């Protein structure tokens, strides 16, 4: 799987990787191709594409595939994520919750569209008042 070491990754580089990942999407039902690229705290990059399923419910988004690629390779801190789709869709609620598990509130999420338009938000903006592991450790 694609894992490129880089210590200073630009949004433009992530966009290219996310576009490449989107080309690998398995989306026979929606025809929508989404690609994501994540940067870990040590500068490793992992990518993912959306993978659909005939059951619909077993479909997985590109963002989660990219994060799980990183985690499964031993990288548990995500600092940056770029997600590409034709219309520049923002991450869904499930993906935002997974980002909370492996990212800091300042993690940067950029969503870009086909025309080159981009929007960048920090994780705390994307999912305010997030439920996290902190809630599980305060059991008084
Ligand atoms: Zn999602």
Image: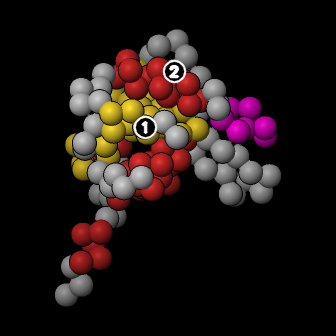
Residue 128 vertical placement versus 133 (above, below): above
Spatial CA distance of label 1 from label 2 is 23 Å
Which x, y percent locates residue 40? 31, 43
Q: Circle 2 sits in a helix, a strand or a loop, which is it?
A: loop
- Relative to the observer, which residue lies in front, 25 or 110? 25
- Foreground mark, 1 or 2? 1
Which x, y percent locates residue 12? 37, 18
Which x, y percent locates residue 114? 55, 16
Residue at screen point 29% across, 26% down: 9
Q: Which residues are magenta?
A: 25-32
Residue, far bottom = 140
- In the displayed structure, does residue 45 sit left or right of residue 33? left
In terms of secondary structure, what is the magenta stretch mainly?
loop
Circle 2 sits on which residue? 113
Q: Is residue 107 visible?
A: no
Residue 108 vertical placement versus 70 (above, below): above
Residue at screen point 61% across, 41% down: 50
């Amino acid at each position: 799987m694609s894992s490129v070491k880089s210590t200073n990754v630009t949004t433009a580089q992530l966009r290219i990787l996310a576009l490449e990942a989107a080309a690998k999407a398995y989306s026979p039902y929606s025809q929508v191709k989404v690609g994501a690229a994540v940067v870990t705290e040590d500068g490793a990059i992992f990518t993912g594409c959306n993978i659909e399923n005939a059951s619909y419910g077993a479909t997985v988004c590109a963002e989660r595939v990219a994060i799980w690629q990183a985690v499964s390779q031993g990288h548990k801190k995500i600092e940056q994520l770029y997600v590409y789709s034709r219309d520049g869709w923002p991450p869904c609620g499930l993906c935002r919750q997974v980002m909370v598990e492996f990212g800091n509130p300042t993690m940067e999420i950029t969503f870009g569209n086909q025309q080159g338009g981009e929007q960048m938000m920090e994780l705390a903006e994307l999912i305010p008042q997030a439920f996290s592991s902190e809630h599980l450790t305060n059991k008084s």
